[in-house]
Amino acid sequence: MSQSGGLPFAQDLPPQGGYQPIRYKRNLPARGPGGIAIFAGVTAICAYGFWRVGQGNLEQRELRREKAWSRIHLVPLLLAEADRDVYRREKAMVAREKEIMKDVPDWEAGKSVYNTKRYTPSSFVVL
């Protein structure tokens, strides 16, 4: 039975030198930066963020200082404005009192109700 139909039988054999080795390992290309590069990037971003926070803190400190000094310099102006307002209101109050009490004999408009010569500001303001 070595022949089939008159043709010589040829057995299928491997090629001379053998087959190529079978590649069974995964051959994936390296994608993206390595771990050290990622760590260095995160460290750089955090360092920049902390630097910006420090700069913002310095700016806020300077703004608070400027606000405090502007208030310190405005206090005399605000006190003078308040004094002018109190004076104007007291003058108007005395004028109203004179008008209301004009028919009462021996009434002194604007006279202090306290028995002292010291200035005592009124405890409330009539608008």
Image (cartoon, helix red, strand yellow):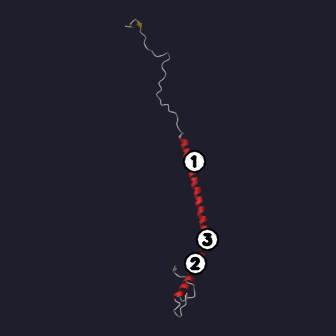
Q: Report the residue at 55% width, 47% height from top.
A: 43
Nearer to the camera, 91 or 76: 91
Q: Quadrant of residue 93?
A: bottom right
For label 1, the SS is helix
Sequence order check, earlier mark of 2 and 1: 1
Label 2 sits on residue: 85
Measured in 3D between alpha carbons, the distance from the residue under mark 3 to the one under mark 2, in whole angstroms, is 17 Å
Kind of residue at disc 1: Ala
Measured in 3D between alpha carbons, the distance from the residue under mark 1 to the one under mark 3, in whole angstroms, is 45 Å
Sequence order check, earlier mark of 3 and 2: 3
Nearer to the camera, 99 or 82: 99
Residue 88's disc is none
Residue 44's disc is 1
Task: Answer above or below: position of 58 versus 28.
Answer: below
Q: Report the residue at 61% width, 71% height from top.
A: 74
Q: Report the residue at 54% width, 44% height from top.
A: 39
Residue 120: percent from left, percent from top: 55, 84
Sequence order check, earlier mark of 1 and 3: 1
Q: Quadrant of residue 118?
A: bottom right
For label 2, the SS is helix
Label 3 sits on residue: 74
Q: Are marks 3 and 2 in contact (CB under 8 Å)?
A: no
Kind of residue at disc 3: Leu
**Badge nearest the viewer, 1 or 3:** 3
